[in-house]
Image: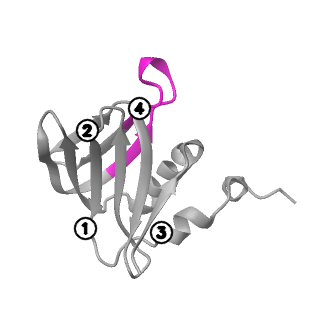
Amino acid sequence: MASTIEIPRENWALYFERLGRQAQTYPVRIEVENQDIGDQEMARRLPLVGIDLETKGSEVGDIEVTVGDADQNFMHHIDEPTRVFLMVDDSGNIDCIEIEDGAEGKTIIFFEKHPGLPATALLSSRVEDEQPAPGP
């Protein structure tokens, strides 16, 4: 059964880092829903380069989604994100990521490659799993 999972704010940076490693080059579609501009498709079937949480400077806390290939690049900046949701399909794969922002808009990143990305692989690992194993 399809489900929606909220990614807690304190896990955003780690989640996006893991997702970037697993999903890099997956074709994505980016749509924006916003009161000012309405619903807009921003990019279609471009490979994911990464999703990054700004950790320094005046844009700390903002999210940047980068897609592209040798022919074209696109970066979408999300000001003041408030919530991040993972939409999981019936097979347990990521259907899309929905990012809500402070202006009551949302950015939706749809993953268009099949087979999809297993959602549980990115959610179930703990931070300790990222540490190198102790030496002999």
4 and 1 marks in contact (CB < 8 Å): no
Position above or below: 59 against 26 = above
The local secondary structure at tag 3 comes to helix
Name the front one of labels 2 and 4. 4
Q: Which residue is mark 2?
A: 75
Task: Please state if 54 lies on the left or on the right of 74 as rendered.
Answer: right
Disc 2 to disc 4, C-alpha distance: 13 Å
Tell me if residue 12 is in the magenta stretch.
no
Q: Is residue 90 left or right of residue 6?
A: left
Residue 71 position in % (x across, y down): 13, 48
Q: Secondary structure at mark 1?
A: loop
Observer-nearest residue: 104 or 123? Answer: 104
Q: Earlier in the sequence, mark 2 or mark 4?
A: 4
| Earlier-in-chain disc, 4 versus 3 | 4
Mark 4 sits on what residue? Answer: 62
Please give the label number shown on residue 112.
1
Give the vertical position of 62 relative to 21 (above or below): above
Picture quarter containing residue 77? top left
Residue to which mark 3 is pinned: 119
Q: Position of residue 40 (x, y in %)?
A: 12, 46
Instruction: Indicate whether residue 55 is drawn in magenta.
Output: yes
Q: CA distance from mark 4 to mark 3?
A: 23 Å
Choose the circle earlier in sequence order: 4 or 1: 4
Of the residues shown, which amino acid type is indicated by label 4?
Asp
Q: CA distance from mark 2 to mark 1?
A: 18 Å
* Residue 47 seen in the current view: yes
Q: Amino acid at mark 1?
A: Glu
**Could you classify mark 3 by the number of other residues whose Cα lies within 10 Å: few (under 14), some (14-19), or many (20 or more)?**
some
The residue segment tinted magenta is: 49-63
Foreground: 77 or 128?
A: 77
